[in-house]
Image (spheres, rainbow, N blue to C red):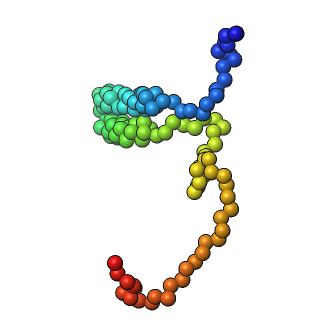
Amino acid sequence: MRAHSAEEAFLITRAENSPEEQHRARVRRYLVLMAFRVPALILACIVYGATHNGLLALAVVALSIPLPWVAVLVANDRPARKRGEVAEYHYGRHENDAPSISAPATVIDSDVADPRALPRD
């Protein structure tokens, strides 16, 4: 029996990464984005010290305000689709069900004009 090399390996499943790997990747993205917030605040202090312009320093701080919100949105996003991956969604049937042609829906009309005339349980 011959051992296969890495060049000969091929994918036999469409399985996604494990939930633990996905969680680690999301935490890593969150931490990277949040790591920009502290340097932005330090940069605002440096800008104010160098220029004595409060509006410019405030602009740097204002740019760092939405970072936590963006970090949470990016971290909670699903993994990106791979190139060529098609979204598969089958409305109203499961994967193993064969497609079928259904009969047109039957409409039942009611002669009851007053809803209070309906029998009660």
Identify the residue shown where x is 30% and y is 37%. Answer: 54
Is 48 on the left or on the right of 111, as rendered? left
Residue 97 lies, with reference to residue 10, above or below; the image says below
Identify the residue shown where x is 54% and y is 83%. Answer: 109
Residue 101 lies, with reference to residue 56, above or below; the image says below
Which residue is more in the foreground, 96 or 66? 96
Look at the image and tell me whether residue 13 can be seen. Answer: yes
Identify the residue shown where x is 48% and y is 30%. Answer: 18
Residue 30 lies, with reference to residue 93, above or below; the image says above
Residue 29, horizontal then vertical, whole percent: 43, 31
Identify the residue shown where x is 51% and y is 30%. Answer: 17
Residue 8, horizontal then vertical, whole percent: 69, 17
Q: Say which quarter of the image contains residue 31.
A: top left
Is 41 on the left or on the right of 25, as rendered? left
Which residue is more in the foreground, 59 or 34? 34
How many marks overall?
0
Look at the image and tell me whether residue 63 can be seen. Answer: no
Name the outermost residue toward the top.
Answer: 2
Q: Quadrant of the N terminus?
A: top right
Which residue is more in the foreground, 96 or 16? 96
Is 111 on the left or on the right of 103, as rendered? left
Which residue is more in the foreground, 62 or 113? 113
Residue 5, horizontal then vertical, whole percent: 66, 12
